[in-house]
Image: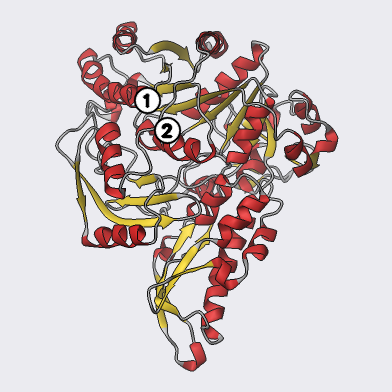
Amino acid sequence: MLSDIEISQKCDIKKIVEIAKKIWVKSSDLEFYWDYKAKLKNSFLEKIDKNKYWKLILVTAVSPTPAWEGKTTTTIWIWDALSKLGKKTIIALREPSLWPVMWLKWWATWWWYSQVIPMEDINLHFTWDFHAITSAHLLLSATIDNHIYHGNELNIDPKKILWKRAVDVNDRALRSFNYAFDWKEKNIQNNSWFVITTASEIMAIFCLAKDIDDLKYRLSEIIFAYNTKGKPIKVADLKIEWAMTVLLKDAIKPNIAQTLEWTPCLIHGWPFANIAHWCNSIIATKTALRLADYTVTEAWFWSDLWAEKFCNIKCRIWEIKPDIIVIVVTIKSIKYNSWVELSELGKEDLNAVENGLWNLKRHIENMKRFDLPIVVCLNKFSSDSDKEVWLVKEKCEKLWANFEVWEWFMKWWDWMIKIATKITSILDKNNENLFNFTYNTNLSIKSKIEKIVTEIYGWYWVKYSPEAEMDIKKISNLWYENLPICIAKTPFSFSDDPSLLWSPKMFNVNVKKVEISAWAWFIVVIAWNIMSMPWLPKIPNATKIDLDKEWKIVGLN
């Protein structure tokens, strides 16, 4: 069987100008990055700014397992199937970062015949958006230290600097370090730490800014430290917001690429995992909604984290609404959440399916709270028995969720056309969008946290550390209490303990710390031991990446 990169390199790739024509984007509207990738010009984005929004399909999944659920694969094939039905369709996806490519390559250009291309470009540097974001982030870091070195007019308290460094490689040695300001030879020591670029507040702001002026304003309002009197200090006080914006002036334009089936794709931005909303940029999503009858986007794995954040943060900030939610599940993931060993997941086990369905049930109920139609998409493997599939179908129908099966390896087009037809028929019948949020932002910070824990995680005990209590008080005193909540916790459980599979009860959500991303417009609630600088495995994927004799990249699998 061909590897991912071999499939990509053997495919018939079309020039991006031909792909753009499918959504009525002219050559003059593109800024070309060679033949197969481009950015949409600002003038084009301004031209379509008053277009109405069409239908938005949100794809998410159940709690992730080592057995692989195939959510992005499903997302891409739903999108291609809609195109084969003659629907004007765009997909809006996040942009790959370097660290997972060098790590295990879970989140790059996706898998097998479900790929966005050109694979090598998108995986490794694409249009240099992340380099621009890293540079803007480090410009602020350098300016803070430089300001202190040259007299510290703003009276920045070196012990109350909130701003971290950023780099797009997961170097665990940089999680925490000490350095000297060397301020007038006083050699003041300070503690600091790095995050990966996708975890930068600038990335979160970048993905929620509506245009370049909005981006500049949001950057200017970043709170990077407190002064010696406890007053917050902003980027505007350093007067570098325009310099930071200049570094991002090209990155802010959405990128256009294609699938192996030549369907247009907007790939733009990636705010990291737990500490942000993990969605592609609002500019890309809104552009897609204005151009196509159907926009397919994703909230990555585990609906309790990223679909919740997509709905309660991204949709709230810029008033967009999904019209339907697709939940991807596998028989293996259901059995894994019934504590079946990984090596045993391929064996028929109706009892394990029955028990594990409680996890799927919670995900369905969570998404139904947003008052949208639900389609459960079962990604079927050859080891799944008909009896196991029937059990899942029966449970979904009892929960009033639509159910469809697709067999990714054998008959994907037949199955995906069927799913795409189901989605369009539901959307055609539902003209009224009843979407609503989990909580009102005018509630207290604790009330919003507890609303998410109660309604989405399925329990109600929240334990706050003394540091978190102080953080909440400080944020409330700064008048930022009315922002949405972004809870950072493990993706592997509804609780904050990754070992608690299934649909657990009787657990605490332990809030360790509360931070403010003031001008990304949300409050980050850190539960338990979440890290913003990931690790590398013993044998990282970087050891497999190479050039062959013809200078073709190999090993991106």
Task: Indicate left or right for 504 with 92 as reference.
Answer: left
Q: Amino acid at mark 2?
A: Ala
Which of the two residues, 131 or 481, is positioned nearer the viewer here?
481
Residue 307 bears which disc, if any?
2
Q: Which mark is residue 367?
A: 1
Residue 344 showing in the rendered view: no
User: Badges 1 and 2: C-beta atoms under 8 Å apart?
Assistant: yes
Q: Is residue 524 above or below residue 28?
A: below
Query: SS class of the residue under badge 1?
Result: helix
Figure check: 266 above or below 185: above
Q: What is the quadrant of residue 51 in the picture?
A: top right
SS label for mark 2: helix
Is 180 displayed left or right of 414 in the figure?
Answer: left
User: Residue type at mark 1?
Assistant: Met
Residue 449 in the image: state x and y as whole percent: 29, 44
Residue farthest along the left direction in this orientation: 506
Farthest residue to the bottom: give it.
Answer: 185
Q: Residue at x 69, y 47 (%)?
A: 127
User: Looking at the picture, does residue 479 appear above or below residue 258?
Assistant: below
Mark 1, other Cα within 10 Å: few <14 / some 14–19 / many ≥20: many
